[in-house]
Image (cartoon, helix red, strand yellow):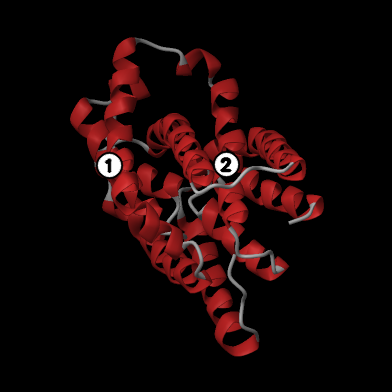
C-alpha cells in the first residue's frame, strides 16, 4: 500500500462510514481494484482508519456526547453484543473480509431492505432525543449492529434500522448509531492492534505514517459528510441508498464473474 492508495481508502471511509452503504465493504472493493496485497496490515488499516472518521462524531456532537452517566450506560449496553460476537467470531469475520463477492451480495440484499424500511417501521409521533432511549431498546440496537460484522451490511445501516424497529425516528436512530460507533470502533481498533502485535508483527515507520494519514483524512472527510447525511435522511429516507446498494452490488458481481477476477485484500 502506498500513500496515494491510503488517502483514497481514507476518503472512501470518511464518506461512507455514516451512510448505510458499508464503509468496510467499499474499502474491500477499492483495495481489490487497486490490487493491494492481501496481508495483515491491510486488514489492520481498514479497521483502524474507521476510528478517525468516528471521532468526528465526538467533535460535531461535543455537547450532546458528554451527557449523564445513564447515557453512557445505555451506550455500554448497546456495545456489549459487539464485544461478545466479535470475540467469538473474529477469525471467521477476517475470512469474510477477503471476499468481494460477500460484499456484493450483502450490498444487494441490504439495498432491498432499505427500499422497504421506511414502510415497515413507523416512528412515534412525538419528538425524540437519544437520551430517551431505554435500556432494552439500546440492547436491541446493539444486536442489530452485530449484523454489520458481515462485510457489506453496514454498521450504521444495521444500527439505524435497529433503532427504527423500536419506533425511533430516522434522525434519532441515526444519531444514536453515531454515538454507538465511538465505543464500537474504539474497541475494534484496540482488538485489531492487539491481535496484530500478538501475531508477532511490528509496524514500520511507513505503516505508522499510513495509519496516521488515513485517520486524519478520514476524520476531515467525515466531518464534511455527516451533517449532510442527517439532513438528507430526515427529509428523504433510505430509498436512494437502497438503489445505490443494489446497483453497486450487481456491478461488482458482473465485473467479478464476467469481466475480471477481483483480487482480494
Please state the horizontal and vertical placement of residue 83, each as a whole percent of the image.
32, 39
Query: Which type of secondary structure does the marked residue at label 1 adopt?
Result: helix
Residue 158: tell me if it is visible: yes
Within 10 angstroms of label 1, few (less than 14), some, or many (20 or more) residues?
A: few
The one of 118 and 191 positioned closer to us in this rendering: 191
Residue placed at 56% from the left, 54% from the top? 43
Q: Are marks 2 and 1 in contact (CB under 8 Å)?
A: no
> Which residue is most to the left?
136
Residue of label 2: 48
Q: Is residue 28 above or below residue 179?
A: below
Please state the horizontal and vertical placement of residue 111, each as a whole percent of the image.
44, 63
Residue placed at 40% from the left, 12% from the top? 67
Q: Is residue 259 above or below residue 225?
A: below
Residue placed at 68% from the left, 46% from the top? 10
Query: Which type of secondary structure does the marked residue at label 2 adopt?
Result: helix
Quadrant of the image containing the N terminus: bottom right
Residue of label 1: 84
Image position of 237 (left or right of 260): left
Image position of 148 (left or right of 103): left
Quadrant of the image containing the C terminus: bottom right
Q: Is residue 99 above or below residue 261?
A: above
Residue 142 placement: quadrant: top left
Image position of 191 (left or right of 124): right
The one of 259 and 215 positioned closer to us in this rendering: 215
Please state the horizontal and vertical placement of residue 139, each as a whole percent of the image.
24, 35
Residue 123 placement: quadrant: top left
Within 10 angstroms of label 2, few (less than 14), some, or many (20 or more) residues?
A: many
Of the residues under marks 2 and 1, which one precedes in the sequence?
2
Residue placed at 34% from the left, 46% from the top? 86
> Which residue is most to the top?
68
Amino acid at each position: 500500500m502506498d500513500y496515494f492508495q491510503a488517502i483514497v481508502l481514507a476518503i472512501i471511509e470518511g464518506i461512507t462510514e455514516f451512510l448505510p452503504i458499508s464503509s468496510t465493504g467499499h474499502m474491500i472493493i477499492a483495495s481489490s481494484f487497486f490490487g493491494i496485497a492481501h496481508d495483515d496490515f491491510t486488514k489492520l488499516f481498514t479497521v483502524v482508519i474507521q476510528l478517525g472518521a468516528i471521532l468526528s462524531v465526538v467533535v460535531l456532537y461535543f455537547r450532546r456526547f458528554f451527557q449523564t452517566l445513564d447515557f453512557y450506560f445505555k451506550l455500554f449496553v448497546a456495545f456489549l453484543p459487539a464485544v461478545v460476537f466479535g470475540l467469538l467470531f473474529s477469525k471467521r469475520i477476517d475470512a469474510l473480509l477477503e471476499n468481494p463477492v460477500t460484499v456484493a451480495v450483502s450490498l444487494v440484499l441490504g439495498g432491498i431492505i432499505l427500499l422497504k424500511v421506511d414502510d415497515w417501521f413507523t416512528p412515534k409521533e412525538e419528538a425524540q432525543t437519544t437520551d430517551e432511549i431505554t435500556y432494552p431498546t439500546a440492547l436491541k440496537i446493539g444486536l442489530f449492529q452485530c449484523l454489520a460484522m458481515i462485510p457489506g451490511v453496514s454498521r450504521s445501516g444495521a444500527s439505524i434500522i435497529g433503532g427504527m424497529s423500536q419506533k425511533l425516528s430516522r434522525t434519532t436512530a441515526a444519531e444514536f448509531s453515531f454515538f454507538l460507533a465511538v465505543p464500537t470502533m474504539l474497541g475494534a481498533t484496540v482488538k485489531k492492534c492487539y491481535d496484530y502485535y500478538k501475531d508477532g508483527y511490528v509496524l514500520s515507520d511507513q505503516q505508522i505514517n499510513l495509519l496516521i494519514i488515513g485517520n486524519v483524512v478520514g476524520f476531515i472527510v467525515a466531518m464534511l459528510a455527516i451533517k449532510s447525511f442527517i439532513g438528507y435522511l430526515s427529509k428523504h429516507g433510505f430509498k436512494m441508498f437502497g438503489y445505490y446498494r443494489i446497483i453497486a452490488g450487481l456491478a461488482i458481481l458482473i465485473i467479478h464473474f464476467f469481466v475480471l477476477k477481483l483480487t482480494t485484500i
